[in-house]
Image (cartoon, helix red, strand yellow):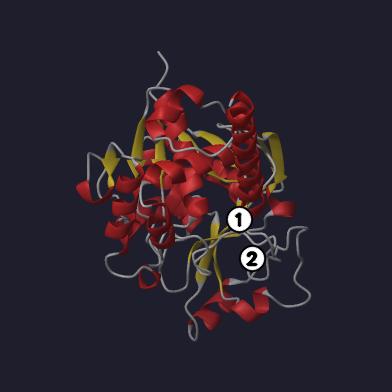
Amino acid sequence: MAKAVCGRFAPTPSGRMHLGNVFCALLAWLSAKKQGGTITLRIEDLDKPRCPAGSDMLLEDDLHWLGLEWDTGGSAGGKDAPYYQSRRFDIYAAYFAQLQKLGLTYPCFCNRAELHAAQAPHLSDGRILYAGTCRHLTAEQTAAKARTKDPAQRLRLPDTAVSFIDGHYGPYTQNLAAECGDIILRRSDGVYAYQLAVVVDDALMGITEIVRGCDLLSSTPQQLYLYQLLGFTPPAFIHVPLLMAADGRRLSKRDRDLDLGFLRQHFVSPQPLIGLLAFLAGLLPAPEPVSAKELLPLFNWQKVPHNNIIVSEKRAAAKKEEEEKRAKRKERKQQHK
């Protein structure tokens, strides 16, 4: 018997959700609900100082307003509580200890300047490939450095190719050593890294399907390797195109691009906003007011574009199309007079 589908929202409450966050949340909700599944809300507040007090409740209010209700998690809790990453450090510590016992971790003393040095290898997308500077330190060298600096902890990644089939983009392969480099599992301040936390959380919370932006596609093989090491069954991964500003920038909370504060004032009700997102996702021929539930019969991953989406151009095209339709309707009315 097939396991019931469980998707998730996993936002970071570092600021108001923007249009891109809502786009991804809508597709995750539609995908899980179309299959008769459930949605879990997890608050990814690992870096607590970056998450203002009350931002999690504002995030929940925005999701309620959008009609993207979840089945378990968030402030309401559930069987896998706590659903706040900042309250799960003891859980991460236990799984980090497992990796330590396997001899797969090592302390890293490199500072930010050293990691971004000109000689550091860069990948084609601009990411820095860790050069393994601290990987071969002797016990004496490690002890000497530890007297003056608290180290981060990295995971040794093998010279191995990991492949998977993304639910939207198809086959993807990454050589862990050549295209990723040893990843951080715990920062020097004791905060556990996203890669470890997200794998542990998704596994323990029974997540079977992850829908997220295509900017995280390249991190999936690393996470699949962690699933293997920790003995977890990995979920299905479905990556989606990003929403971009007219100048090619990715929408971000930092720039306050089309955040929910602005959008709720502009649209007044959620249906026009959901309709715009459905149009951007290829589910509607033009933006028109619609609820998330009304989109369920129309949802199909084959309709969703693969290329990143320029929001302003799409909106302008839709506006032009609607204006042309109105002009034709007006012309037909005049002809019938």
- Residue 110 visible in the current orientation: yes
Whole-percent x, y for residue 29 in the image: 42, 36
Circle 1/circle 2 CB separation < 8 Å: yes
**Residue type, label 2:** Arg
Instruction: Identify which residue is drawn at 50% across, 82% down.
Output: 149
State the SS at label 2: loop
Q: Looking at the figure, which quarter contains the C terminus?
A: top right
- 178, 6: nearer the viewer: 6
Image position of 114 (left or right of 58): right
Q: Can you tell which mark lies on residue 99? A: none
Residue of label 2: 135
Whole-percent x, y for residue 44 in the image: 39, 56
Instruction: Identify which residue is drawn at 45% across, 32% down.
Output: 30
Q: Looking at the figure, which quarter contains the N terminus?
A: top left
Disc tally is 2
**Residue type, label 1:** Arg
Distance from disc 1 to disc 2, alpha carbons, whole Å, reads 8 Å
Estimate how packed mark 1 is, as few (under 14), some (14 to 19) or many (20 or more) residues with alpha carbons within 10 Å. some
Compared with residue 48, is residue 287 higher up or lower down, i.e. above or below? Answer: above
Quadrant hosting residue 71: top left
- 169, 57: nearer the viewer: 57
Compared with residue 41, is residue 90 higher up or lower down, i.e. above or below? Answer: below
Residue of label 1: 156
Task: Name the N-terminal-most of marks 1 and 2.
Answer: 2
